[in-house]
Amino acid sequence: MGSKKDENKCCESGKEGGIWFTISRRNFLTLAGWGLFFAAMGAYLGQLFGYKGFFYPKVLFEPSPRFSVGEPKAFPAGSVTTLKSRKIFVVRDADSFKAISVVCQHLGCAVEFSKEKNIFECPCHGSKYYRNGVNFAGPAPRPLDHFQMILDDNGKLAVDTSVKVPLETELIV
């Protein structure tokens, strides 16, 4: 057997003041494992506390469901005006107004108004609606949604899409 000095030689470098351990495969894999662990923890904590993380409010910023559509005189009698950005039709018959949804009740497509036929039609699946929003053909199971329409203090028409009203409801000005 060797001397005590020979037994401790495996863990010492040849020079005085050299590295304090040998780079073996086990040491390398241990260091790599710890490095991956700390990198994963850093990424998780960065996600949790970073920009738009834990302290950022989880809010969906949407436009107000109540909005003004203009003065009554801006809509000619017997007209159907499409407001695509608000997803509604403003229907005027003589002195009455209705706010009807653009969204088809079958699969949520956007219906269009046909002036020639005087009806609403879904270009995707063929649902058809009368001018008052009642379905009469195609796969749509129910009429188009109608929304509350009021005349505000400034004399302008305002629509509230958060309030659905019966089909017969109309604003008379």
Image (cartoon, rainbow, N blue to C red):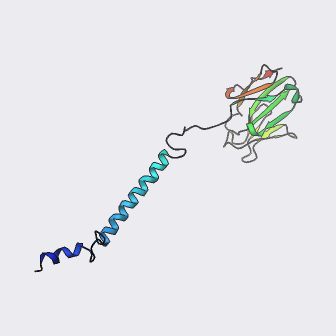
Q: Looking at the image, is 143 positioned above or below residue 121?
A: above
Q: Residue furthest front?
A: 16
How far across and how far down the image is residue 25, in percent? 32, 72
Residue 66 image-quadrant placement: top right
> Residue, x 77% and y 40% (percent of image)?
84
Residue 64 image-quadrant placement: top right
How far across and how far down the image is residue 70, in percent? 82, 29
Q: Residue furthest left?
A: 1
How far across and how far down the image is residue 24, in percent? 30, 72
Q: Residue furthest bottom?
A: 1
Q: Looking at the image, is 111 positioned above or below residue 39?
A: above
> Residue, x 29% and y 71% (percent of image)?
17
Q: Nearer the viewer, residue 62 or 19?
A: 19
> Residue, x 86% and y 22% (percent of image)?
95
Quarter placement of the N terminus: bottom left
Q: Nearer the viewer, residue 158 or 90?
A: 158
- Whether residue 128 sits left or right of residue 55 in the image: it is right
Q: Looking at the image, is 31 positioned above or below residue 16?
A: above
- Whether residue 50 sits left or right of residue 83 in the image: it is left
Quarter placement of the C terminus: top right
How far across and how far down the image is residue 30, in percent? 32, 64
> Residue, x 30% and y 69% (percent of image)?
26
Residue 136 image-quadrant placement: top right
Q: How many labels were placed on the picture?
A: 0
Q: Nearer the viewer, residue 135 or 91?
A: 91
